[in-house]
Image (cartoon, rainbow, N blue to C red):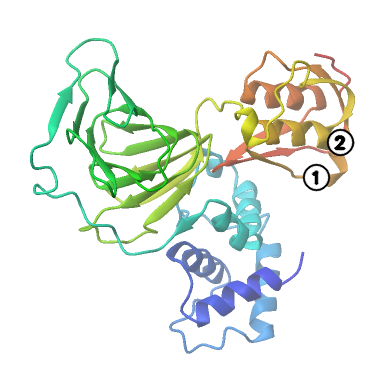
């Protein structure tokens, strides 16, 4: 560990380029050492200040004061003070990679769908008790859950394909690079070229977009206060939840990640997940590539631990849970990435 990441974050703060999340993290650690910058005139590049921050982080890992986290966090933050401190340190050290891996960008909000845009549109509401599938003019399909509604033009124009969704729908979009497919749902817009994804409206006003294949960009529409990043790009097995009260995007993995199509580079031949004294690092690389999910090892010393197991019939999470049980490891899901941690190869369980 060194001061490089802290120094970079301080330099971004001085230049006025910190995102709201980065600034809150930096201010959080300044608070822990009773040194909160009053304004950008403070010389945060002073090496003594950087050293003071780092020493304070290390010294308070065992006794960090109670403080409500200042950024959206998952349930694992709610454990002990030590885990909170360690997690915050990891986040601070990897701040650049953490946010870039989730592909969240700040940009102006897109124009909201107007009444004029929807002039002459058709509407289809699923009044049945089972999902119904609607085929559009471009051969794209939309499966609507009971009570959901889709508004769409009788034919798409030559530049783009616009629709509006109320409720929950699963889209399977025909590829057409020259005409992006745009789904408006409440205060967000989902943009695709050709992919499969599901949009779900929650009872609490939240909206979830989960990607099954391809890539989508989820953006806020105009009229928002823009207190958070405005756009998130999702790849397969990832989802984003837009929370209305805070206008925040929260990225994570879908509830049941699926193996990627063979064209995406995943290896799905029979026996792919049968291992016999195989290095843990190799096992995780195969699983991660198959599902398009990054899996980290918290302790490099466990990379060589041998794994003997047949995981072909298990889903993504069960595969990792079995490996964790075999090697006496713990598993954590943070955002759209997975972490396995442990002290060593303690178990000889076979599966």
Image spot of residue 282 (x, y percent): 82, 35
- Quarter of the figure that contains the N terminus: bottom right
Q: How many marks?
A: 2
Image spot of residue 146 (x, y percent): 24, 17
Residue lying at the far top of the rendered structure: 129
* Residue drawn at 54 percent across, 44 percent down: 77
Q: Nearer the viewer, residue 114 or 334?
A: 114
Image spot of residue 167 (x, y percent): 24, 29
Label 1: how many Cα within 10 Å (few below 14, some 14–19, many 20+): few
Left or right placement of residue 149 versus residue 74 in this view: left
Helix, strand or loop status at disc 2: loop
Cα separation between marks 2 and 1: 8 Å
Left or right placement of residue 348 versus residue 160 in this view: right
Label 2: how many Cα within 10 Å (few below 14, some 14–19, many 20+): some
The answer to whether the residue labelled 2 contacts the one labelled 1, judged by CB atoms less than 8 Å apart, is yes
* Residue drawn at 63 percent across, 47 percent down: 83
Task: Answer whether residue 247 is visible to the viewer in this image.
Answer: no
Could you say which quadrant of the image residue 266 lies in?
top right
The residue wearing badge 2 is: 344
Helix, strand or loop status at disc 1: loop
Could you say which quadrant of the image residue 62 lies in?
bottom right
* Residue drawn at 76 percent across, 36 percent down: 285
- Quarter of the figure that contains the C terminus: top right
Q: Which of the labelled discs sits on residue 55, or is there none?
A: none
Task: Answer whether residue 137 is visible to the viewer in this image.
Answer: yes
Q: Nearer the viewer, residue 87 or 190?
A: 190
> Which of marks 1 and 2 precedes in the sequence?
1
Q: Which of the labelled discs sits on residue 299, or is there none?
A: 1
Left or right placement of residue 142 versus residue 8 in this view: left
Image spot of residue 24 (x, y percent): 47, 65
């Amino acid at each position: 560990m060194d001061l490089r990441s802290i120094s970079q974050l301080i330099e971004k703060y001085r230049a006025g380029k910190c995102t709201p999340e980065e600034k809150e993290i930096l201010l959080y650690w300044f608070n822990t050492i009773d040194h909160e910058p009053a304004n950008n005139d403070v010389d945060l590049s002073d090496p003594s200040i950087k050293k003071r921050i780092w020493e304070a982080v290390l010294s308070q890992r065992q006794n960090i004061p109670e403080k409500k986290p200042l950024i959206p966090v998952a349930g694992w933050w709610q454990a002990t003070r030590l885990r909170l401190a360690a997690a915050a340190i990891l986040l601070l050290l990897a701040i650049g990679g953490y946010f870039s891996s989730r592909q969240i960008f700040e940009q102006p909000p897109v124009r909201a769908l107007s009444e004029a845009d929807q002039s002459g549109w058709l509407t289809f509401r699923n009044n049945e008790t089972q999902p119904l599938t609607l085929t559009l003019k471009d051969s794209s399909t939309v499966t609507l859950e009971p009570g959901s509604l889709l508004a769409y033009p009788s034919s798409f124009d030559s530049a783009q394909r616009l629709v509006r969704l109320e409720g929950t729908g699963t889209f399977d979009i025909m590829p057409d690079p020259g005409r992006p497919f745009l789904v408006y749902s409440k205060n967000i817009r989902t943009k695709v070229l050709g992919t499969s994804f599901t949009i779900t409206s929650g009872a609490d006003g939240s909206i979830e977009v989960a990607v099954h294949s391809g890539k989508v960009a989820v953006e806020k529409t105009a009229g928002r206060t823009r207190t958070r990043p405005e756009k998130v790009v999702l790849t397969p097995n990832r989802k984003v939840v837009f929370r209305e009260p805070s206008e925040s995007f929260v990225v994570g993995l879908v509830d049941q990640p699926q193996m990627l199509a063979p064209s995406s580079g995943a290896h799905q031949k029979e026996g792919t997940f049968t291992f016999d004294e195989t290095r843990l690092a190799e096992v995780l690389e195969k699983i991660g590539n198959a599902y398009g999910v990054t899996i980290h090892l918290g302790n490099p010393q466990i990379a060589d631990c041998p794994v003997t197991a047949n995981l072909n019939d298990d889903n993504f999470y069960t595969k990792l849970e079995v490996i964790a049980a075999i090697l006496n490891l713990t598993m954590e899901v943070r955002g759209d990435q997975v972490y396995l941690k442990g002290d060593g190869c303690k178990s000889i369980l076979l599966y």
